[in-house]
Amino acid sequence: MELLKKLGNYIWSKQFGINLGIIIVIYIVGFIILNKCLAEKTKWGEKIEVPNLIGKNQNNLKKILGDSLEFEVLGSIYDPSKVEGTILSQDPKATSVTDIYVKSGRKIKVRVSKRTQMIEMPKLVDKSQRFAETILKSRGFRYTLEYKPSKEAHGAVLEQLYKNKLIAEGIRIPIGSKIKLIIGRDQAGVPQALPNLIGLTIEEARVRVANMIDMDFQVACPEGYTSADSLSSRVETQSPDYSEDGRVASGSTILIFATKVAIEQEP
C-alpha cells in the first residue's frame, strides 16, 4: 500500500511531468525526421509515367526518357525485318498498358533488334549430302551444290566453302550466308539437263558444256576454224538435238555444227 502511494505521488509530481514532456517531444521530432528521411529515400508520393518504347530506336532513348529515367540494353534479338537497334521489348512495360507508375531514377530494361546474327559453321565434310543440306537449312544458311568425280565418296561432302574459300568448323559467319558444298559423285551415267546451244558462239557453247558433269565437247565446222573463229562462229545444230525436257548422261559427247559469221567491214 505504501508503494502505490509513493508511485501516485511521483506521477503527479512536477519532475514526472517534465520527463514525460521531454519524451513526447523527442518522439515527435524523431517521427518527423524519420518520415522526412524515408520520403527522400523512397521518393514517396512521386509518380512518373513509363513511356511506350516499343518500335523506337535505342539511339533516341536518352531524349525520350530525359533525366528522370534511365535505361539498360539487356541484349539483342535477330530480326532482319526491323531497323538495327529497334526496341522489341521493355521492362517495366508502358504505363498506358499496365497503369503502373515508377519513381525517378528507375532503370528501364530493353531488348533491341539486330539485322545480323553470327552462326557457327558446322562440320559437313564426309557427311551425306542430305544431312548437310538439313543442317545448313536449320542454321539459316543458303547453299549451292557442285559435284566432283569420286567413286569412294559418292553422295558425301568433299569440301565446304564460303566465298569460294575453304571454311573450317566453328568459324562464325552471318546467318543467311551462302555455302558451297562440293559433293562426291560416281558420274557414270548421271542424267542431266541437255542445254540449248543453238545460236551461241563456239566459245559460249564450250563454256556451257564445261559447266556440266563430265561431258565431252566436239566441234564440226566445214570450213575449219581457229581460236579467233570460236568467238564469231555460231552453232547451227547440235547432237543430241535439244528438247525442253531433254536429258543426257554424264560421260557422253555433245557435238555441235557451226558456221562462221561474216564480219562486215566498215567502208
Image: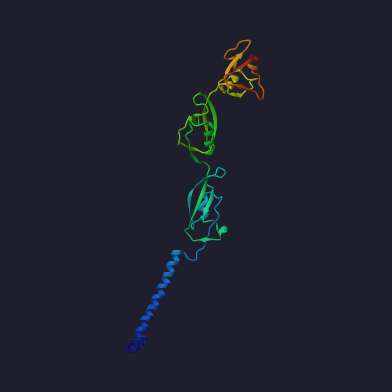
Quadrant in the rendering for residue 206: top right
Q: Position of residue 95 (x, y in %)?
A: 55, 59
Q: Position of residue 62 (x, y in %)?
A: 50, 53
Identify which residue is drawn at 60% across, 14% down. 219
Q: How many marks are shown on the rendered structure?
A: 0
Residue 64 drawn above or below residue 229: below
Could you tell me which quadrant the C terminus lies in?
Answer: top right
Is residue 38 visible to us here?
Answer: yes
Q: Position of residue 100 (x, y in %)?
A: 54, 61
Quadrant in the rendering for residue 238: top right
* Depth order, front residue of 102/79: 79
State how the image is colored: rainbow
Relative horizontal placement of residue 242, taking residue 112 as reference (left or right): right
Identify which residue is drawn at 40% across, 74% down. 29
Residue situated furthest top in the rendering: 223
Is residue 236 visible to us here?
Answer: no
Identify which residue is drawn at 38% across, 75% down. 26
* Depth order, front residue of 225/77: 77
Relative horizontal placement of residue 262, taking residue 134 as reference (left or right): right
Residue 19 drawn above or below residue 63: below
Quadrant in the rendering for residue 204: top right
Could you tell me which quadrant the N terminus lies in?
Answer: bottom left
* Depth order, front residue of 214/56: 214
Q: Position of residue 169 (x, y in %)?
A: 45, 35
Residue 128 drawn above or below residue 69: above
